[in-house]
Amino acid sequence: MKTLNSYTQFYAADLDTRVLNYTLAKHEVHRWLSIVGQKGLSQLIDDVNNGNDFYKSYNTIEKENSK
């Protein structure tokens, strides 16, 4: 799966691509939440609100909860 780094990439003009993007996002969110739980989600929100990079925090929280 390629990385989508912009609003424009996610909301592609092609309906089939948009449906695929939403489906993949749903599965990724489910997978991540099953690992980190509510505590991890709260930490991610706090990190982003404090100016931390979303992707770095997302990956760090997952690694910390995968042990």
Image: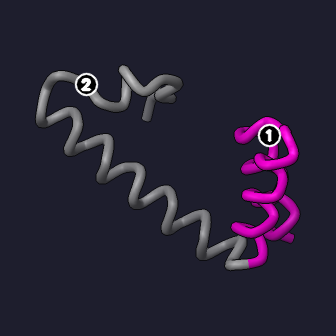
Residue 47: percent from left, percent from top: 83, 51
Q: Quadrant of the C terminus?
A: bottom right
Position of residue 9 relative to residue 39, above or below, is above
Which residue is drawn at the image coordinates 69% and 78% (left, top)? 38
Magenta span includes 4: no
* Foreground of the two, 29 or 11: 11
Determine whether the residue tagged by mark 1 lies in a helix, strand or loop.
helix
Q: Quadrant of residue 19?
A: top left
Q: Main secondary structure of the magenta part?
A: helix
Determine whether the residue tagged by mark 2 lies in a helix, strand or loop.
loop
Rendered image coloring scheme: one colour
Magenta residues, start to end: 39-67
Which residue is drawn at the image coordinates 77% and 77% (left, top)? 39
Q: Which residue is mark 2?
A: 12
Magenta span includes 57: yes
Sort mark 2 into few (<14), some (14-19) or many (20+) by Cα contacts within 10 Å.
few
Residue 15: percent from left, percent from top: 12, 34
* Residue type pointed to by label 2: Ala
Which residue is drawn at the image coordinates 79% and 36% (left, top)? 53
Q: Which residue is mark 1?
A: 56
Is residue 7 left or right of 58 when viewed as pictured? left
Is residue 3 left or right of 67 when viewed as pictured? left
Sort mark 1 into few (<14), some (14-19) or many (20+) by Cα contacts within 10 Å.
few
Residue 7: percent from left, percent from top: 42, 27
